[in-house]
Each structure stands twice: as C-alpha cells, then as structure tokens.
Amino acid sequence: MGIHIIKMPDIGEGIAEVELVGWHVNVGDTVSEDQALADVMTDKATVEIPSPVVGKVIALGGNVGDTMAVGSELIRLEVEGAGNLKGDAAGGTKASSSAAALDVEAGSSSAVSSTPTAPTMAATTSHASPESASSTAATSRAAPASSIAATSHTSSASASRALTPSNPSADPTSAGRDAGQAGRSSPASHHAALSREPGERPLASPAVRKRAWDLGIELRYVHGSGPAGRILHEDLDAYVQGQGAAASAASSGYRERHDEAQIPVVGLRRKIAQKMQESKRRIPHFSYVEEIDVTEIEDLRAQLNRKYGESRGKLTLLPFLARAMVIALRDFPQINARYDDEAGVVTRYGAVHLGVATQTDAGLIVPVLRHAEALDVWAIAQEITRLAQAVRSGKAERDALSGSTITLTSLGALGGIVSTPVINHPEVGIVGVNRIVERPMFRHGAVVARKLMNLSSSFDHRVVDGMDAAQFIQAVRALLEQPALLFVEA
Amino acid sequence: MSETLNTTLLVIGGGPGGYVAAIRAGQLGVPTIVVEGQQPGGTCLNIGCIPSKALIHAAGEFERAREYAQNAPLGISVQAPSIDIAQTVAWKDGIVGRLTGGVTALLKKNGVRLVRGWARVLDGKMVEVDTGHGLRRIHCEHLLLAAGSEPMPLPSMPFAGRVISSTEALSPTSIPDRLVVVGGGYIGLELGTVYRKLGAEVTVVEAQDRILPTYDPDLTKPVAAALARMGITVHLGRKVMGMNADGDAVRIQDASGAETVLPADQVLLAIGRRPRTQGWGLESLHLNRSGNALRIDDQCRTSMHNVWAIGDIAGEPMLAHRAMAQGEMVAEIVAGQKRRFTPAAIPAVCFTDPEIVTAGLAPQQAQDAGLDCLVGVFPFAANGRAMTLESTEGFVRVVARSDNHLIVGWQAVGRGVSELAAAFSQSLEMGARLEDVAGTIHAHPTLGEAVQEAALRALGHALHI
C-alpha cells in the first residue's frame, strides 16, 4: 500500500487560487478512477476534479469554502502499489500525522459520513434490527465498518481497534469490503466471503481484468469462485447482477431516518445569498399585486405564433411584458433607475437594461437584456432565449451579467397567484409574473371565461412612491389588456 | 518558424514504448504525432536488444566453428575459421534497418505522423522540435514522455578514447586484444561474452561480490561457471578508480584498498542506464521524481494532468516489453478506455550463455513477501531434448504458494531458455496453479517439458527425476 497525493491542478491559465466548493467523497471512501473527487470554482467556471487512481481517501486537504492554491495538496489516497509520496518511511509518518491533524475536521464531517453508513449496514446485516444497528452504531457489529468509512474519527477508530482482535479473521475483510461499498454509496450487495486478505491483489486473467475495467468494476470487491480464489467471467456476471438486485431491494420500508446533511453555502450560492441579504437589509420593499386580463394578448400571441412562428420564432408572454414595461417606463423614469444609497444618488436611465431572472442548475442568475427599448417582441424573445442558454451553459459574457436597470422575474407555470420579488440591488423595482388561469368573469353583465394573470411587483420605497408604482403597473396593465397599444408608436 | 502543429497525442520518443503507443492510438483514431531524433525503434531496435542479440548469435556461431576446428564430438570438423567483423556488423545493421523501416511503415499505415528532430518541452501542452532545418512547434492535448534512457556515465571514467558504451560496442570495427568490462550486469556480461567468443581477452570488473546481482545465486552460478570456462576473468568487489595516467589500463581497488591495473585496449562501461530526463526542457514541468526517473502511477500518469510517461524514463524495470505494454495502455486511456497497468509479472531475460529468464517472484522474494511457498526445481540434465542440444546445464524452477498452489514465480537458466518466458508469464497472468501446469501436456521432446516437470516436482511427484 502506498500513499497517492493529488494536488490542486491548474484548471485555467494563470489562476493561482481556486475556491473549493464541494467534496464528492469523504474520508474512508473508496474511489475509482475518474470518479469525481471535488468541485472547485474560479472566476470563470466550476470544474470537477476527477481521481486519476483507485484508492481509499485518507485525508481531505481542505474544507468546502476554502480558497486553495494551485499545487497544494487536495486529497490523500491510499493506493495499491507505491503511490506517489516520496520515501515510504517518511510517507508513513506523514500520513499518520496528517490523519491525526484531520481528526478535528473529521469529527464534524463524520457526522455526515458515518451516519449514512449505519442504515446501509442495517440493511445488509440481516440479524441486526434497524433500530439497534443505527442507535448502537458505536458498539454493534456495524461499528468497524462505519469507523473504517471514517478512518480518522477518533472514538470509533479506537472502538474498531478494540473490536478487531475478537473478530474472526474473515470479518475485517468483509468490513473493509462493506466500507468500500458504502463509500461508493451503493448498497452492499455480494455477501459471499472473500478469500482474499485486505490489500491482496485479486487474481484474474487478463481478459477478466479488461472486462472489469470496461464495466467499471473493482475486482477487489468481486468474489472469486475459481481455483485459488481466481475471479472468473461467471463471477463478474454474478457481481453485475447482484448490484442491480440490491439496488431495487433497498428502497422498501417505512424506516425512520436519522441522516442529516450539511450543505455548505459556497460559490455561486454564497454570492446569491450575499446579494439577497444585501437587497433585503438595505431596501425597504413594498409589494403591489394587480390582476391583468390577458385574454386579448393571449389571443394575439396565438395568432402571431400561427402566422410568424415559423419565420420569426415562437413568442411567450415575456417579450410582450418586456415591451409593455419599456413603454410604461417612459412615463416613470424614477422606476428605471439605480440607487446608490451611500452616495445618495439615484441614476435614471434612458435605456432599459432588463434583468431577466433565470434559473440554472447552479442557482438563480440574472442576465441582462440590454437596450430592450430598441428591440421588437421577436428580437426580445430571441435575446431572452440566447441569454438563458448562455447562463445555463456557464458561457455568459461578463457584461451580460451586470448593469440591469430593472428586473423581470417569472416562474412560468409555477408562477403561483402572488409572489413578493426581491429587488435586484441597486435597482429600485422588480416585476414578477404569476400564473395565467382561466376564470369566470362578469363582462357586460354576462359571465364569460377570461384568462387572468397577476403581476406581483416590488419597489424601493425610499425612492419610489406607492402612487407612482401603482400608476406604473396600471400603465403596464393597460398596455397588456389592449395589446394593439404595444405596437403603436406615440 | 513554420506553423504550429496540433494533435491530440504527442509522443516524445519513437522507441518501443513510443511507437507502440502511437500505433495503438492510430488504431483507435486518436490523432497522433511521434517526435524522434534518430531512427524509430529507439535503443531497443538500434543500439540495444536487437543488435546485441544479432552479435550474440554471430559470436556463438563463430565459437562453435572454432570448437569444431579443435575437436569433433559430433563428427563435424572444420578448418581454422575466420571472421570478417565488418561483414558481421553489416549483417546486423541490415536486420536493424529492416526493423526500423518496418516501424516507420507501421506508423504510417496507422496514420501516425512521424516528425524527425529533437524535442524541447515548452510546457505540458507545447513542444518545440528542432528538425535540423528550423524549429517547429507542436501543441497537444496529451503529452506522452517516452524518451528512454542512456548509458550511465562514471565520473571517474568519462566516455572518451578507449572508454566506450554499449552503443559503440555494438558496432565494432575491429575486436580489441584486451577488453575490460566495467559492470557485471546483463549488458556487460552479454557483450563481454560476445567479445570473448570473437577472440578478445575479456576481464569483467564488478563492484558487488557477485555477477548479475539482481538475480539469485542459484541462477547466476551456471553463468559464472560458463564465464570461467570461456576464459573470462571476473574481478568481484572491486572499485573502478579510472584510467591510469597513460590511458591504457583501468585502475581498480579491492576491499582492502590495494590498487591494481588492468591493461585495456578498450573499456566497455556498462554500469547501468539512467532515464533521459535532462537537457530537453523536461525540468520546467517540475514533475515528481522517483530517484532519477519520472514518478508515475498505475496508469502511467505523471504528476501533471495529461502528461504521461512510459518505459525507461519512468524507471525500472527498463525493459522494452514493459514500455510497449505501458504505451498500448496509455493510448487506450487517451482514447477514453479504462485501463490500468497491473501485470501479474513482467518477465526479464538475460542473454548470457547460458541464458537466464525470470517472471514473478524468486523463492527469497516470495519469502520476504510473507508467502509460505513450495519450490520445484527440474534440471536440464534430466531433459532429453537438452541432451540432444548439448545444453544440459541449468534448470527450471517454479515458486508457488503452499496453501493454494497458486504459481507466483518462474525462473530458469540454460541454453535457449529465453523462449520459456512466454509460458512463464502466461501461466502467471492466467493465475495458474501447479496442477494446471502439471496437468497440461507438454510436447516431447522439448525444453518445455522441464516446466511441467518443475510443477510436478513442487507437487512432490516429478516423473523423470
């Protein structure tokens, strides 16, 4: 066994530091080659760091949220063979001292890493009831496995040391294997006792080895039924089938759950959090909700899409709303503005740089549709689509992410009936779109079906009066309810 | 400067590791460029394995003819034979030329571009090649370092004048009267034997207390006896102090500090080989080292992302077939396959006379690894085929675990035993037990019967002894 150290790679030209934004592995996990170890973030992108080797995690080089230098130690793995740590003797002492140093952080992380292990063990240890396995994890037979899963967790590590001598010789083997299984967060499957000692290389012909690599299977975990414990093709077949069966069996029952997960708020999420907190703390919001009859504009939209959908692209409601805001804002310049509250200056803009709140896998991002006042509805639609794709693929250019003067937010079909949007500081207004619903309405004394939609908007009450805000929204409403006005140039 | 070339895989060095990697990458459709400053084929084809085996064969034939000229046990008699060494070398060069030409053709056939010139590493993705008529830059996604090794120099005895390396020794213009070989490893002994058979007075100086120190004494004893019979003088436990003032003798010192001189017309310095990591910009990558060699993991990755190293530059064992297997694997990984370099054994052959072949663990190594082992030895003296070949010297030895009879190692010494390497490594890779080999019918009469008999002997029921 050797120690393999993986250093923080240089993930972009000239970047000396990166932020560690997530671990995919815990101490004690067995990682396979190319398995993701960690996510790191630069100014430009979040990058996954894969493992170049197979091994067991024995130390993590940092906490989520840490800023790490390129070239610093990211993770330390125990690997078969010599590893890449210079000098075996030095490696031994270095490894153990760093493992000791990591005890402190393992104490907190083991709450995360060892707890999920206990239910796994309960599921696989047929003679232990779920309650006893989870509540007495520290002393039950499950303990060695969970403590191996979190090697550096001081108390359970010593518990395992105390227990190991009394265990039959087969136990460390199966415990080690189960720990490996748990580490890969797949339910332990194959119960046949392995005839190999821990660390002994599995015996298999080159053809079997190649097939295992292609299947992504670690031969160490495969029972060998051949002579001298040789792993045969049949053993691989059985292992593959066993994995599938165990996965489907694991989801049964009304088990109590005691797992909890602490998700560090880092990277983009941290930026979003800061921004939201800044907005809410600084800006005295007031919200205003108005109901809009969108029957006419929906009819118009359907017609336009029928007629021009092929040639100019399909329209959603958003481009009409954007256009309505552009026109309405001509009379309400105080709402299309940015308020520098420290300097005490409100800057009003002729241009409408419309922030369009967009959900991405990483979180909420507000790309900016620049000069919305100069675009017709189709151009707006195209630009919104382009921006959404750009931010979702992480390829948005820098000026597409800043400089908005007012923001439009829509949850689409999830719009609900009312929302209280948070202003995108230092702007002073935000307009939120709620769901369209068809309702019976009185119209000229008759009950008719109409399409209705709420607009929920928020404004910075320090610089926008309620009357102005209400009049602005009424202007938007008027434009949307008589959509011809959207296309009339005054 | 001409335009920058772009490729997916850039291989530095067209030796056995590099050219195999390139061929395999080409087969898998990976755009590949090989940079080679000399003929493709590397040390192995040009100045190593192949030319040395050619000369060993020629020297053996010559010696046999001389024997027949003296006495005729087989009834063959010959008038005093002579050798035209220039013709011998030309014949050897012809073989080398055919093989390197073959490699060039294979590269071409698989769509690999061969760039002739010396590479200089600029960074992990960019290499500059001095093609002799200008510099050319090559940008790559994957950089494969396969630059091989070079003869280790001895500070007290620089390569100059009478002091030559194996490279020069493989292209002699004449045979010196007195050759001193510094280094009792396989290179020194193979070439020393060649020169002895071609008529030189040969003296071997070795610092340790026995020849071929990496092999166990049972294996080297028949070689030492054969050297003595041939009339090669071996000085063990001697330190080489350098050439004398006149430059016509080697000064050696024994353990007590007493100094003597060995007159020499030529000195072959063969104390080992070192990875070729200096002088071509590799230092700028600051790759992790293991001694002189680049440190690699079991996928031949260096400490830098997408920079790979195979073969001699990545340290011991410096064997062509290891480099080839590593090269093949790296090409497959680059092509997106999951591979690992985890052979059960890398066989090694020493083409002395008699030959030595090993694969896996020797008895002592197995014991050091904590294994309780059975050892079975079968001597060629009891093998019919060996008698008909006049080569009854030596034996085959098998090492197997006593609990499950899994074979963990094979060794053999004797004439022609290098060909047993295939059987040895195959049984190890397949995970054969003693019963598997014992239960396999081996053709009679062949040397291979000794393999089966060794397994039978380890099981306690050899038939022919």
Image (cartoon, rainbow, N blue to C red):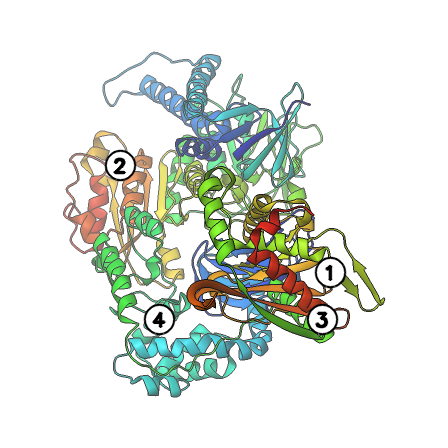
Few, some or many residues within 10 Å of mark 2 (<14, 14–19, 20+): some
Tell if the residue under mark 4 belongs to the same chain as the one under mark 3.
Answer: yes
Q: Visible in this render: residue B271?
A: no
Q: Residue at x 54, y 58 (%)?
A: A360
- Residue mark closest to the camera, 2 vs 3: 3
Q: Amino acid at mark 4?
A: Asp
Relative to B2, residue A389 above or below: below
- Front position in the image: A281 or B177: A281
* Chain under callout 1: A
Between the C-alphas of marks 1 and 2, the distance is: 108 Å
Indicate which label's residue lies in the foreground, 1 or 2.
Answer: 1
Q: Is residue A447 visible?
A: yes
Q: Image quarter for residue B320?
A: top left
Name the residue carrying label 1.
A332
Closest to the camera, between mark 4 and mark 3, is 3
**Residue drawn at (65%, 48%) of the image:** A397
Front residue of this view, candidates A416 and A105: A416
**Crowd class of label 4 (few under 14; some 14 to 19; many from 20; radius 10 Å):** many
Circle 3 sits on which residue? A467
Depth check, front residue: A39 or A94 = A39
State the CA–CA distance, disc 1 to disc 4: 67 Å
Callout 3 amino acid: Met
Which of marks 4 and 1 precedes in the sequence?
4
Image-based side of A439 in relation to A351, left or right: left
The residue pinned by badge 4 equals A178
Mark identifier at residue A465: none
Alpha carbon separation for disc pair 2 and 3: 112 Å
Q: Is residue A216 above or below residue A117?
A: above
Lateral position of residue A36 relative to residue A339, left or right: left
Residue behind mark 2? B392
Q: Is residue B109 left or right of residue A96?
A: left
